[in-house]
Image (tube, rainbow, N blue to C red):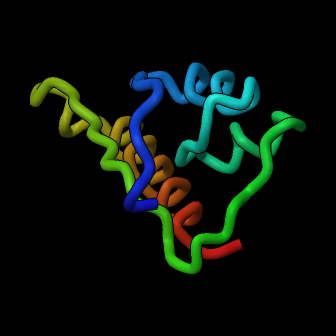
């Protein structure tokens, strides 16, 4: 949408969804959020939407913990699975 203008800006995906549902415009939202809000609908622009980086930080003393490694592996797998086309 090269000629679109910013009408509302927020880091909160919930706030973006609420504004879109109120008719304020369009947003790139996670499917889990957008699909549960009935006023919203998906728009096919013919290309993949922009991505969003996710960072995880933890103290270096926790690095050897097996449960932390399992958690990081699980989250990475889940986020990676959402990158796949539905």
Residue lying furthest left: 60
Quarter of the rendering containing residue 46:
bottom right
Residue at image position (35%, 36%) is: 68
The residue nearer to you, when weighing 51 against 57, is 51
Quarter of the rendering containing residue 42:
bottom right
Residue at image position (46%, 24%) is: 8
| In the rendered image, the vertical position of residue 22 relative to residue 80, given as above or below | above
Quarter containing the C terminus: bottom right
Quarter of the rendering containing residue 40:
top right
| In the rendered image, the vertical position of residue 46 relative to residue 10, given as above or below | below
Residue at image position (40%, 41%) is: 5
Residue lying furthest bottom: 46
Residue 57 x %, y % = 22, 31
Residue 29 x %, y % = 58, 44
The residue nearer to you, when weighing 12 against 45, is 45
Residue 51 x %, y % = 39, 57
Q: Is residue 41 left or right of residue 46?
A: right
Q: Is residue 60 left or right of residue 84?
A: left
| In the rendered image, the vertical position of residue 49 relative to residue 18, given as above or below | below
Q: Is residue 45 left or right of residue 65?
A: right
Q: Is residue 84 left or right of residue 3?
A: right
Residue 14 x %, y % = 60, 23
């Amino acid at each position: 949408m090269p000629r679109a203008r910013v009408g509302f800006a927020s880091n909160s995906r919930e706030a973006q969804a609420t504004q879109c549902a109120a008719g304020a415009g369009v947003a790139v939202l996670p499917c889990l959020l957008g699909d549960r809000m009935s006023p919203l609908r998906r728009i096919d622009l013919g290309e993949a939407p922009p991505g969003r980086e996710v960072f995880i930080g933890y103290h270096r003393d926790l690095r050897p913990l097996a449960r932390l490694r399992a958690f990081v592996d699980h989250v990475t797998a889940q986020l990676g699975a959402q990158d796949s086309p539905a």
